Amino acid sequence: MKEQDSNSLFIGKVQIRLDSVDSTNKFAKDLLSKTTPIEGTVIRTDRQFAGRGQFGSNWASDEGKNITISVILFPKFLLAVQQFYLSMAVSLSVLEIIKSNIKDKVVTIKWPNDIYVNSKKIAGILIENTLNGIYLKESVIGIGINVNQEYFSSELPNPTSIFLETKQKFDLDKIVLQLSSSLERHYNSLNAAKPMDMMIEYQNNLYRKGQLSNFKIIENGEIVQGVIQGIEENGLLVLIINDLIHKFSLKQISFLL
Ligand code: BTN
């Protein structure tokens, strides 16, 4: 465990650096079940051999080439029904860092929190929360950013990395520091009750907003075409399908590539 120099005051000040771990999110959750780490503790590894993705998927990352971290936060000021705000704050932070390192490309947020360069996925976010009554209690913010990886498994539908987009290798430590400051700034804005500004920024950076796209209705497997109008405060995706407004939660619809 060591203290890091960065512009942030608490995120990343304590960093637990592991040579190898199954999943940094799992490690963070185990830690929370045994002790009370300080808020902002970052768990980071060069080799994650059973990385977790959304909806029980895997997150694969070549050793030493990418960022695989989890940040421990205690967002006790947020109601459980406001948990999308956290997802929004984290997405905007990762978006900012990717944009600042990749110039002149279209970088967007694919609802709810994948980061895309054009139509390829460059980063994924897995947030695991615990609740205390109607409030959030602990949050493990897992972030995977493809940085220097050149080759990806052909099983992945559309991966990319900062290297593939820029043809340059990047210093992982520097990106972790940038990310820590950006996360802290966005998280503090949430705490200062400024989610509406963030909401606007999130919507302005939404992947395929205003374009006709294909979606799958999870309940019956039906494929529909719709145009993304925006997002509601609670994170629902607002789509226009056949001239009618429909709202979907993550469990109800998936975005088809
Ligand atoms: C997704 O897009 O499906 C989410 C991927 C999240 C991956 C990160 S890597 C660090 C952290 N630890 C994990 O096991 N998963 C997250």
Image (cartoon, rainbow, N blue to C red):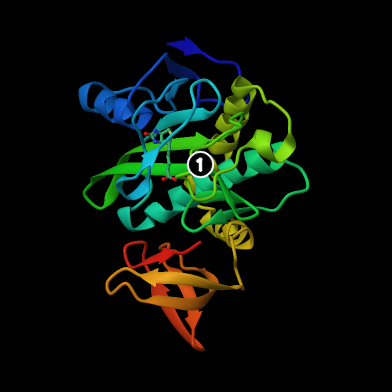
* Number of numbered callouts drawn: 1
Along the line of sight, the residue nearer the viewer: 157 or 52: 157
Image coords of residue 200 (percent x, y): 60, 61
List the single residue furthest toward the bottom.
243
41 relative to 120 in the view: left or right: left
Q: Which residue is farthest top?
A: 2
Circle 1 sits on which residue?
Answer: 187
At horizontal 31% and vertical 68% (from top left) the residue drawn is 218
The residue positioned 45% from the left and 22% from the top of the image is 44
* Image quadrant, ligand 1: top left
Query: Is 99 located above or below residue 250 in the figure?
Result: above
Residue at x 43% of width, y 31% of height: 71
Is residue 90 among the parts visible in the rendering? yes
- Name which quarter of the figure residue 59 lies in: top left
In this picture, is 25 found above or below 2? Answer: below
Of residues 126 and 257, which is closer to you in this image?
257
| Left or right of 47 on screen, residue 108 | right
- Determine the image quadrant of residue 49: top left
User: Relative to the observer, which residue lies in front, 75 or 111?
Assistant: 111
Is label 1's Cβ within 8 Å of ligand 1?
Answer: no
Where does residue 207 sit, x and y in percent of width and height?
A: 59, 60
What kind of element bears circle 1?
helix
The amino acid beneath tag 1 is Tyr
Tell me where residue 90 appears, x and y as whole percent. 50, 44
Q: Is residue 76 visible?
A: no
Residue found farthest to the front: 154
Within-10-Å neighbours for mark 1: few <14, some 14–19, many 20+: many
Picture coordinates of residue 150 (x, y %)?
61, 32
- Position of residue 146 relative to residue 209, above or below, is above
Q: Residue at the spot x=61%, y=55% of the render?
A: 119
Specify the quadrant of the image occupied by residue 125. Answer: top left
